[in-house]
């Protein structure tokens, strides 16, 4: 989970987090999501979750992310602290990038690279007329790549653009010598990534203070 977080921070070009006994605090700065606290090892150290939840009262628009083997119990504990959780958990997934199923870009589409730095690559998939069809980015941190913000425009779904975007991002990481991918997926995203060969390695509970 720590490796995922490093790639996520790189993808979004955020400042490095501060850490206090297994809780990472990151300033995100997004509307409705100003601060993110990542709780590491919460199953073995439940007091970390309690401390993160209590400290979130001092933040504006705080979110808390927890990797856990017991998402139901973890969600209940966060609710006890006055936080709201999603109806179900998200999923930590990994893959050897060379083993990810490849998908070619459909004919008539082109790729525009919007950001290319040592820490991240961001791209858009465009139609023949230049309109946006899909987009995605990948954070690069150490030996892992973290795909992030994979999105297909509603009018262009069911055409394999999500899989093609993931292929382009994996190729970018492999070209830099990075061989492993890690991401956190919603239930909907999990189905796409599973078809590409990604495997679930754990549940993730996300909560926010409303």
Image: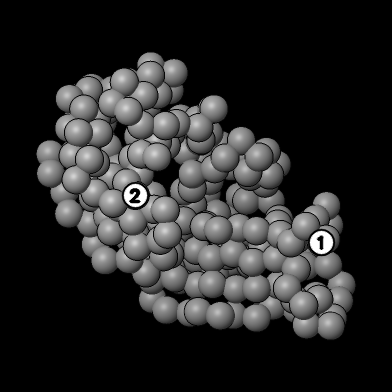
47 vs 45, nearest the viewer: 47
Q: Quadrant of residue 119?
A: bottom left
Quarter of the image with the N terminus in it = top left
55 vs 195, nearest the viewer: 55
Residue positioned most to the left: 21
Would you name the residue on which mark 1 appears?
156
Q: x and y percent of residue 29 in the render?
A: 35, 62
Image point (40%, 36%), residue name: 207
Image point (39%, 53%), residue name: 33
96 vs 132, nearest the viewer: 132
Would you name the residue on which mark 2 appears?
61
Q: Is residue 128 above or below residue 95?
A: below
The local secondary structure at tag 1 comes to helix
Q: Is residue 115 above or below residue 63?
A: below
The answer to whether 81 appears left or right of 121 in the picture is left
Q: x and y percent of residue 61 in the render?
A: 34, 49
The answer to whether 201 appears left or right of 153 in the picture is left
């Amino acid at each position: 989970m720590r490796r995922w977080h490093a790639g996520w921070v790189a993808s979004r070009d955020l400042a490095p987090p501060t850490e206090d006994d297994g809780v990472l605090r990151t300033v995100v700065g997004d509307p409705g999501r100003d601060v993110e606290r990542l709780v590491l090892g919460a199953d073995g150290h439940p007091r970390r979750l309690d401390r993160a939840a209590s400290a979130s009262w001092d933040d504006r628009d705080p979110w808390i992310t927890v990797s856990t083997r017991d998402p139901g119990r973890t969600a209940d504990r966060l609710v006890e602290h006055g936080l709201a959780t999603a109806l179900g958990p998200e999923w930590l997934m990994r893959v050897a990038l060379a083993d990810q199923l490849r998908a070619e870009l459909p004919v008539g589409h082109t790729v525009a690279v919007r950001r290319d730095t040592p820490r991240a690559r961001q791209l858009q998939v465009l139609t023949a007329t230049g309109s946006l069809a899909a987009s995605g980015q990948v954070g690069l941190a150490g030996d892992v790549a973290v795909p992030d913000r994979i999105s297909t425009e509603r009018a262009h779904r069911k055409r394999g653009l999500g899989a093609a975007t993931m292929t382009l991002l994996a190729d970018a990481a492999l070209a830099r010598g990075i061989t492993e991918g890690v991401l956190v997926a919603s239930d909907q995203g999990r189905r796409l990534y599973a078809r590409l060969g990604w495997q679930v390695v754990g549940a993730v509970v996300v909560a926010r203070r409303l």
